[in-house]
Image: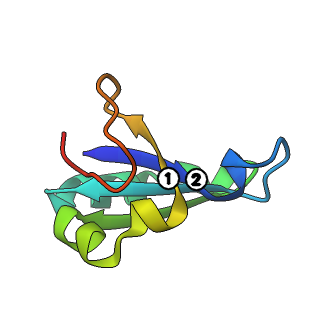
Amino acid sequence: MQVWAFGSALRSDRPNDLDVLIIYQDRAGVDELRSAAWWEISFPPLDIIAMTEDEERHYGFITGTNAVRLHPTGANPSAGSTRT
């Protein structure tokens, strides 16, 4: 699973929300995160978008939003690449 940040949180000290992209292979992990519902009490609000690697490649979401990879850490691929 990969976690990427994008949106106003990357450009502002006082973002309206925290936008997070999750790239997943196993939908069960995403469902588990959603069922925890911890984002419902976060401030600023947390907005989660989940995509498979194929979906991200199709839409070019990482490149289009200038997303920054948060997890896994280590060798951080350039924007637009979803390879681990």
| Sooner in the amino-acid sequence: mark 2 or mark 1 | 2
The amino acid on which the numbered mark 1 sits, given as a three-letter code, is Ala
- Find residue 17 and report its image quarter: bottom right
Identify the element where label 2 is drawn.
helix
> What is the crowding at mark 2: few (fewer than 14 residues within 10 Å), some, or many (at least 20)?
some
Q: Position of residue 4 (x, y in %)?
A: 44, 48
Residue at 75% from the left image edge and 48% from the top image edge: 43
Judging depth in this view, the residue of 78 and 61 nearest the camera is 78
| Residue at left offset 53%, top offset 63% | 65
In depth, the one of 57 and 73 nearer the eye is: 57
Q: Is residue 1 above or below residue 75?
A: below
Amino acid type for the residue under numbered disc 2: Trp
Q: Can you give x and y, in whole percent of width and height, for residue 76 in the image? A: 34, 32
Whether residue 14 sits left or right of residue 56 in the image: it is: right
Q: What is the CA distance from the residue labelled 2 to the residue labelled 1?
A: 19 Å
Question: Is residue 49 visible to us here?
Answer: no
Q: Residue furthest right?
A: 14
Q: Quadrant of residue 45?
A: bottom right
Number of the label disc, if any, that sits on residue 39 = 2
Label 1 Cα neighbours within 10 Å, binned few <14 / some 14-19 / many ≥20: many
Mark 2, mark 1: which one is toward the viewer? 1
Q: Residue at x 74, y 49 (%)?
A: 11
x and y, in percent, of residue 44 in the image: 75, 51
List the residue tagged with mark 1: 67
